[in-house]
Amino acid sequence: MAIERTFSILKPDATERNITGAINALIEKAGLRIVAQKRIRMTREQAETFYAVHKERPFFGELVDFMISGPVVVQVLEGEGAIAKYRDVMGATDPSKAADGTIRKAHAKSIGENSVHGSDAAETAKIEIAQFFSGNEIVG
Ligand code: ATP
Ligand code: MG
């Protein structure tokens, strides 16, 4: 399998509880490398653009409000099959359905405040990385 890059966000519920290091430890234990990382506060416009695919969903307003409610850590992760691997490490969107050993099982508070985001496909990974990082900020 090829070396890929995926985009990750440690969401406001993670920064609020000071568990970004605990989550990074699970990411690294899975064999993914954090090749770019910065702590930012998303603007409403950035969050709306980022989650535009969900704009017709009933939870869209709540999701955007949550994503701008505190700092987030945006990351680029690199590794063999990184996109699917990180989705596995994250676990199901709803933490009550997430498998043992996953980030969301261990840390997520609810289906909305679920600690992490990870890209769902190669094309979205590319778009999401470019929304938050310039090429010289990614050091593999
Ligand atoms: P993400 O895109 O953040 O990695 P995901 O791909 O597992 O998560 P999506 O279906 O893309 O899940 O939903 C995006 C985000 O919207 C979820 O991570 C969660 O924060 C929020 N969300 C999804 N479903 C609900 C819901 N029913 N109620 C509240 N928030 C939700
Ligand atoms: Mg998603």
Image (cartoon, rainbow, N blue to C red):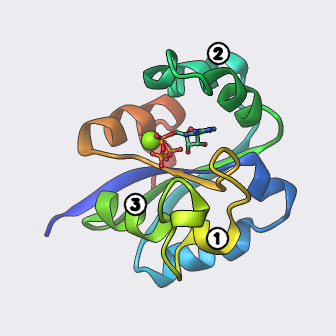
Q: Which amino acid is tagged 3?
A: Arg
Q: Which residue is disc 2 drawn over?
A: 45
Residue 13: % across, % down: 78, 52
Q: Which amino acid is tagged 2?
A: Glu
107 lies left or right of 136 = right
As drawn, 102 above or below 49: below
Looking at the figure, which quarter contains the N terminus? bottom left
Residue 122: % across, % down: 25, 44
How many labels were placed on the picture?
A: 3
Residue 42: % across, % down: 71, 30
Check residue 23 in the rendering and tell me which mark sits there, or answer none.
1
Instruction: Determine whether the residue tagged by mark 2 lies in a helix, strand or loop.
Output: helix
The response on whether ligand 1 sits within 8 Å of label 3 is yes
Q: Which amino acid is tagged 1?
A: Ile
Q: Nearer the viewer, residue 45 or 115?
A: 115
Q: Which residue is disc 3 drawn over?
A: 87
Indicate which label's residue lies in the foreground, 2 or 3: 3
Crowd around label 2: few <14 · some 14–19 · many ≥20 (10 Å): few
Crowd around label 3: few <14 · some 14–19 · many ≥20 (10 Å): many
Q: Residue at x 50, y 64 (%)?
A: 90
Crowd around label 1: few <14 · some 14–19 · many ≥20 (10 Å): many
| Residue 109, visible in the rendered structure | yes
Among the two numbered marks 2 and 3 on one chain, the one whose residue lies closer to the N terminus: 2
18 lies left or right of 119 = right
